[in-house]
Amino acid sequence: MNNPPATLVRTWYELLITSEDESVKKRAKEMLLGAYGSEEAVVFNLRKLKLIK
């Protein structure tokens, strides 16, 4: 598991939830999963960064 900069994680998350382009969403999800290893770890870290509740 890596610890990418919070700004980068925030960017990936914002692209994932706001982009209308499915390829952009897919890439953002791939980057988050690549950084944290699993969906559970992504959620944990998004909560840690206060991007989700």
Image (cartoon, grey):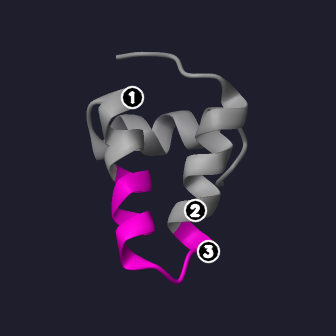
**Is-magenta flag for residue 53?**
no
Q: Estimate the spatial distance between the alpha carbons at disc 2 and disc 3, rounded to whole Å.
A: 5 Å
Q: Which residue corresponds to the image point at 51% horizontal and 64% vertical from the top-left? A: 16
Q: Which residue corresponds to the image point at 72% horizontal and 34% vertical from the top-left? A: 7
Q: Which mark is residue 35?
A: 1
Front residue of 53 and 21: 21
**Residue carrying label 2:** 15
Q: Which mark is residue 18?
A: 3
Q: Do the residues labelled 2 and 3 touch (CB within 8 Å)?
A: yes
Q: Quadrant of residue 18?
A: bottom right
Q: State left or right for residue 51 relative to residue 2.
A: right
Front residue of 53 and 32: 32
Residue 9 location in percent, x, y?
59, 38
Q: Estimate the spatial distance between the alpha carbons at disc 2 and disc 1, rounded to whole Å.
A: 15 Å
Label 3 element class: helix
Q: Main secondary structure of the magenta part?
A: helix
As drawn, the residue found furthest toward the top would be 2
Q: Which segment is the magenta one? A: 17-29
As drawn, the residue found furthest toward the bottom would be 20
Label 3 Cα crowd, 10 Å radius (few <14 / some 14-19 / many 20+): few
Q: Which residue corresponds to the image point at 64% horizontal and 54% vertical from the top-left? A: 52
